[in-house]
Amino acid sequence: MESSLAMNTLLFLGVAIIMVPLARKFGLSSVIGYILGGIIIGPYVLRLTGKDVNDIMHASEFGVIMLLFLVGLELEPRKFWEMRKKIMGLGLTQMLLSISLLFLVFLSAGWRIDKAIAIAMCFALSSTAIVLQTLQEKNNLKTMAGEASFSTLLFQDIAVIPILAILPIIANYKSSHHDNEIQILIQKLPEWLQAGTVILGVAILILLGRYVFVPFLRYVSKSGMTELLTASSLFLVIGVSELMAGIGLSPALGAFLAGVMLANSEFRHELEAQINPFKGLLLAVFFVSVGSTINFNIIQKDPVFIFSTVFAVLAVKFIVLYAIGKFFKIDTSQSLFYAFALSQVGEFAFVLLNYASDLYLLGPEMNAQMMAVTAITMCITPILLIINDKFITPKFIKEIPDDKNDFNILDNNVSQKKIIIVGFGHFGSTVGRLLKANKISATVLDRDSDRVKLLRSYGFKVYYGDATRIPILRAAGIEDAEILVLCLDDPDDNKFVADLVREHYPKVRIFVRAKNRIDAYNYLNNGIENIYRETLGTAVDMAVDVLHETGMRKYAARRLGQRFMAIDKASIRRLAKAKGDDEILLFTTKEILQREEELLAYDNLNFDNRNWEGSSSVDEESDEENET
């Protein structure tokens, strides 16, 4: 059945919508659902896709690029530099051992030396898309195994560059041949200069990030149009990946480095929110296309060879990864997860195998067989991870918790609650400054790009973003947050965000700024207890100062002011229980004033009269201390 690219895309999205919820219902990874859906609609089962399947796969590879860009946004340059030893240690060791052992296995099977080394280099790579997607789904990105996997994948992306340079050398391929479709800058340089493209690419990205990307986003944000920021986000990611591909760097690696360069910018969360939907969509299409391109005719023709190669690759990489994990002192359960997660062959193998075929290192049939091996290992990995989670990992978990260790963990993190402040104007910045002065960090969102730029220059970690949109809140970490402080100028926006968070994240404690009593009524009626009227405290402070000028002692005036605020807040809570606005209006201003006067008068009867008249020098000193 022949079909257009648009029809194929429609089929891919449709099967993803059907298969992924079904897979999740049975406790399987979403990746399995995508790949199974691709197999079902592919040219070897229902034959619903046409000849443009490979075109869709190439287009959907941008999902992998966007995934790495988002990961880069989460990793500040300082943290990236701190990980350099892990990246080099884990990544370099894994690549060298995997290539060496796979080469020996293939050589012992009777393969030619050039074919064995070429395929060994392709198969040493792991799937960034599958591994990072799995780590995010299981929330394992910050575990020891997660960090080890991430470091190894980063090095593998870097390793794509020398592999591209080495393959023509192995094939004794001269640049004067023009039948290769992959024409990139790295292959036009002398061999001794090719390694320098990494440094060149990083230097270009640093300059672009500092002098182009951030000013460009500030310029676009001033338009106030969300769709332009979406377009700008896609423009940056796709533009950087294409630029890096032209230089010779892996596009995914270039996107990751661009993300790292922007991780310290005020647009970090805004970019994450804009890119995330496209990342998920394109990754879904990518995984479906992997399933649809499995050549079952090739598998049926020689299943023993195909599956023995699959087993050999998975076994060799598993042994290497587990040994590396233990060598770098990762505990057993984490080492097993690390080994299972990265034992498959990665998506870059599709590109490298085709390149090797163009260089005549592989024949058409061998190329198709290795493509099938790559796809099968990608399909098997989620199943292996499920087996690890269900049957292997539980054996390494202590049945009785260590109270001492649990207490120490709690004690060390007791003050590390995740706090998000929305709105950093005059009101919000007061809250933020007080927290910062007490060494308490918070994620701050504000939608005034000029204010964000100014505050960041003063050392505040403020990010540009519209918190009325749930993707922005997710990007800022609302799922892990414990406290949300709403300080926006617009009361309607504060109420909208409060309702949004209470609906989707009911466990988050909300502290909200209110303009007046009516705002306070609405918040209380909606179940929000922590309300702060911006006019109350300032007005009471003024009244206290006026009382002091009339002759009242400072301590007495302050005490009366605090008592007044307590009475006022109590009356607000009582009025909030009224059934409607009519009952609130019936409680007139005159009645409110009369009630407050009665309560204050009663309070004064029980208050020491010395605070109204003269007092000893001790009282004077106490007042002086209180005043300071």
Image: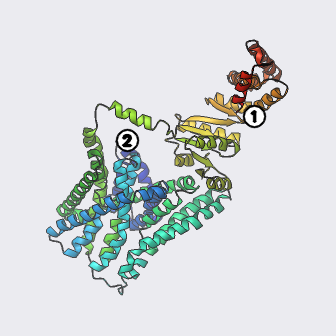
**Residue 29: x %, y % from top left:** 36, 47
Q: Residue at x 36, y 59 (%)?
A: 85
Figure check: 578 above or below 431? above
Compare residues 40 and 384 and report the one nearer the observer.
384
Q: Among all residues in the image, which is located at the extreme bottom?
A: 176
Compare residues 364 and 311 and report the one nearer the observer.
311
- In the picture, measured across the screen, residue 446 lies left or right of residue 353, that is right
Instruction: Tell me the residue that label 1 is attached to.
Output: 538
**What numbered label is drawn on residue 115?**
none
**Residue 169: x %, y % from top left:** 29, 79
Compare residues 142 and 376 and report the one nearer the observer.
142
Name the residue type under label 2: Lys
Instruction: Tell me the residue that label 2 is attached to.
Output: 25
- SS category of the residue bearing label 1: helix
For the C terminus, give its image quadrant.
top right
Figure check: 262 above or below 508? below
